[in-house]
Image (spheres, grey):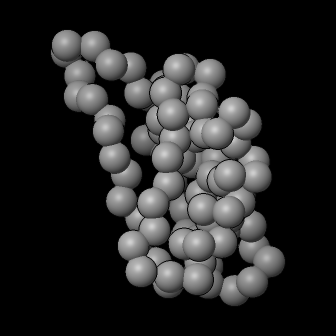
Amino acid sequence: QGDKGSGCVLAHNMGLGKTIQVITFLHTVVDNVKETPSTFELRRILILGPVNTMHNWKAEMARWLPDEGMLRCGKRLEVYVLD
């Protein structure tokens, strides 16, 4: 806490771990947002990118997230691709 962070860059070259970084980031955000009256409710996250990348990420999330996307916090991570 209190760390302002330093950001990150997801490069476009193959083999740099973009898929696992995105899955980890989304899981961490969804799992750690506390839904209390004094904060906001996280309902959707929009990610824009090439359609083939989005289809790949959707398949990888289905592979790596157990129980059809159900997270420990009781929320479900659902992925939709608009192409």
Image quadrant in which you'd find residue 33: top left
Q: Quadrant of residue 57?
A: bottom right
Above or below — where is 45 with respect to 27? Answer: below
Quadrant housing the C terminus: bottom left
Q: Position of residue 63 (x, y in %)?
A: 76, 52
* Residue 44: image location, x then y, percent: 34, 46
Asked whether, in this view, residue 67 is left or right of residue 78, the answer is right
> Which residue is drawn at the image coordinates 75% and 73% (left, top)?
16
Which residue is depicted at the point 54% across and 72% down? Answer: 54
Q: Is residue 27 left or right of residue 78?
A: right
Q: Position of residue 21 (x, y in %)?
A: 66, 57
Q: Position of residue 62 (x, y in %)?
A: 68, 52
Identified at 33% across, 19% down, the residue is 35
Q: Residue at x 62, y 22 (%)?
A: 72
Seen as rendered, the residue at the extreme right is 15
**Residue closest to the eye, 10 or 4:** 10
Which of 23/3 is in front?
A: 23
The answer to whether 19 is drawn above or below residue 39 in the figure is below
